[in-house]
Amino acid sequence: MENEFTLYLDESKSVDNIFVIGGFACHISKEKEIENKLQKLKEKVWKNAKTRAEKVFHATDYVRKYPKAFMDLIEIVREAGGVVFATVIKLDELTELFGTGYSKSNKTSFALVEDPFNIALEKIIENYTHFLYYRNAFGKTIYESRSVENENWITSPDFMLKKDYLRIISNNKGIVYVNDEALKLCNTNFSVKRKKEDVAGLQIADNIAYVIARSMSHSLKEIADIEKIFDEIFNLAYNGNFDRFKKDLRHFYGIKILPEMFRTIPMERKGGEQIKYYNHMIKQLEKRVRNLLNPNSKNNVNQSDT
């Protein structure tokens, strides 16, 4: 397909229960460019690496050693026209709001709360579909493997991952705003790749998810440069096809934080009153500016007399 994108995803979790699925989408025509640039970056960072395995960018191992290289990773995404997608789930808040979902004293055998992994994936797929639709495009998704070597496929995390993805697409599971037909037509394929396959996009996605998880954590002593890296990542977050400088919606379409803090009716009414007040003040200021620009204005004469 000529107008086709690939979404690369990986996951990360901080020590204080911040769970993230994150990565980026790029046009398939840019995949080779990303691979070549990542290879050059590896050669610059690991001049004496003897094996291919030594040259796999894994965030938890290398972000502290090579913060400059991680800025370079984000620059590779930017130059390829990549767009960042992520979901952040604050697991402690999720438990506080909904509980654990299952109590031993409860005779029911089903859980109340959806698996946070599925919640995160659902939100990303929904926003990715929005992205594809407005580009008249199709998209595949590649996720980094969660299984161990030689694990039975039917019982493996990767099998469950693919099953959950297909459930989201086929049943519109967890999708709130996007039409079922658009969801099925825009999303064409899902695959899982192991780290040893050395997929360039997945290595970058690994680092994107890691940096977002660390930046959202308030209890960690962070690397000095990690906030700068996050700022660069956030600059590439999907903004819902809007002009970011007129309407910044990256927190809704690009990097979404859950659970959302619901706005109440009193808050909405108070907010509406504030908007009315600000609009009134703006009109008054505009009127004063017009009067100042027109020295012959009747209002100016009256003001000078007083």
Image: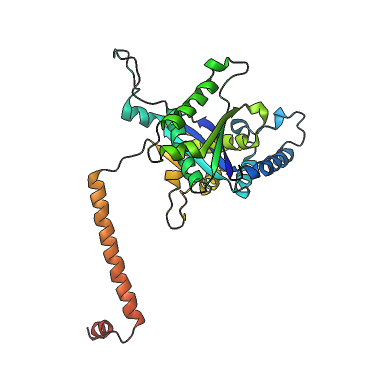
| Image location (x, y in percent) of residue 226 | 55, 41
| Image location (x, y in percent) of residue 127 | 46, 41
Q: Is residue 202 left or right of residue 297?
A: right
| Image location (x, y in percent) of residue 95 | 35, 27
- Is 187 or 279 nearer to us in this picture? 187
Whether residue 163 is visible to the viewer of this picture, yes or no, is yes
Q: Is residue 246 left or right of residue 23?
A: left
Relative to 199, is 268 above or below?
A: below
- Is 165 or 229 nearer to us in this picture? 165
- The quadrant the N terminus occupies is top right
Relative to 52, is 262 above or below?
A: below
Relative to 5, is 286 above or below?
A: below
| Image location (x, y in percent) of residue 175 | 40, 35
Whether residue 63 is visible to the viewer of this picture, yes or no, is no
Q: Is residue 289 left or right of residue 79?
A: left
Number of numbered callouts drawn: 0
Determine the residue positioned at 49% across, 48% down: 134
Quadrant of res 110: top left
Determine the residue positioned at 49% across, 24% down: 163
